[in-house]
Image (cartoon, rainbow, N blue to C red):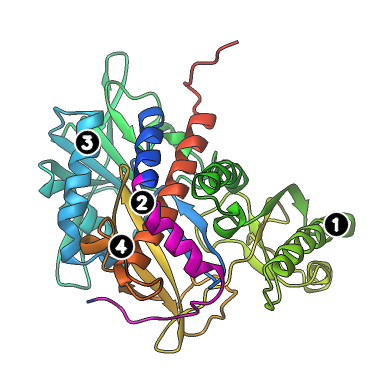
Amino acid sequence: MVPHLITALTGPINELEQRILDSMPAIERWFRLEWMEHTPPFYSSVDVRNAGFKLAPVDTNLFPTGWNHLTPQMLPLAVQSAMAAIEKICPEARNLLLIPENDTRSSFYLSGVAQLKRIFHMAGLNVRVGSISPELKVATTVDLPNGEQLTLEPVIRKKGGGRGRLGLKDFDPCTILLNNDLAAGAPGILEDLHEQYLLPPLHAGWSVRRKSQHFRAYEEIAKRFGKLLGIDSWLINPMFTPCGEVDFTSPASLDALSAQVDTLLTKIRRKYKEYGINEKPFVVVKVDNGNCGMGIMAVREAKEVLALKDTGRQLAPGQTRCEIVIQEGVQTHERMNDAVAEPVVYMMDRYVVGGFYRIHAERGTHESLAAPGASFVPLAFAESAQLPQPGQKPGVSVPNRFYMYGVIGRLAMLAASYELEATDPDAEVYE
């Protein structure tokens, strides 16, 4: 089923869609050459926002959850991509250990883990789910909403080669797939493994990652891609400002943050004027390291930041000081049944494998939709992501729109590749 959406198809987005369709051979060649030089993240998901005049990624997740929202029609593509990804890393792979988040009380989250397990099983691997949570002492079977069951087993660290190997009581994997964003840091049990592949690597976790570094890499890519297409890169790139550490109890620190918000809003207003956009711009104040939906505040006026002095609001609960990045806000003008919607693109290796619309009836066009109360409707990526229909008018063809989303998703995935290379502790440094 292809969701019926009402989209604001006005302004440059039509021109952008047409430019992307006309440039498809050049775009695919450009990506092909990039992947000859860079390694894509093992898997990723990207939140995309279509403002009607601008299309841009606003969040990139390197430990994507929600795989249960992909439809059965999307599975063959995901399985083929999983095969390609595993072949590059460990062609002789037989056993795969899947490590979920430590807090596994959500049966909906575990439904996504079960879907991942299914994908890699169909890719030809023996897959078991092992938890590194200190609270899980024995194998535990969980009932899932769809009637399935998922067994979680405690991970064991075994000695081997002077270092250690992760496994289960009677299961020795050569590949370990993390679906745990390591926001609290990398636990020692995952470090210094002997002849085992850990995917994604530890430095992909939020204890190391910074959104500002990702946006910086994306900005560089967007400029080069914009040059390829002959477009203003702003149409696909949200501007941003890294702010460093902010003390939310310090008036001076909030004053400095307010000034930076004002500077970025001024830049956005100039762009809006250039393109004749009559919307009121906004920025999103985000915690620089943290998963989707955490520590986010939309701001239309710099003085709203100063109001934090009086409200005592904290972006990160329990923290009065944290690293902050300000990002240009991108509205979403897509709707489903009067509820605000945004596309989320899922990728494995360098391929788009599916996606869904995140929908939230209680959120506005400028707010984050990654919040309790969100619902999900699958996208028809599996049939159409790589099969656009040239010759159709912009905005008419659903496959064309999905192809455009897939291109933006892959640009963000490429930025994540640059980001991981820059933060790789084992990378060779040439003087």
Give the secondary structure at mark 1: loop
- In the image, is 357 to the left or to the right of 326? left
- In the image, is 419 to the left or to the right of 153? right
| Residues rendered magenta in the picture | 2-25
Q: Marks 1 and 3, how far apart in space?
A: 49 Å
Residue 144 in which image quadrant: bottom left
Task: Please name the residue that numbered disc 1 is placed on.
Answer: 250
Q: Amino acid at mark 4?
A: Pro
Give the secondary structure at mark 3: helix
Residue 45 on image: x %, y %: 39, 54
Q: Marks 4 and 1, how far apart in space?
A: 56 Å
Give the answer, above or below, for where 417 lies relative to 115: above
The N terminus lies in quadrant: bottom left
Q: Amino acid at mark 2?
A: Met
Q: Is residue 41 visible?
A: no
Task: Please name the residue that numbered disc 3 is placed on.
Answer: 86
Q: In the image, what residue occupies the spot 28% across and 47% down?
A: 137
Q: Marks 3 and 2, how far apart in space?
A: 28 Å
Q: In the image, what residue occupies the spot 46% across and 75% down?
A: 372
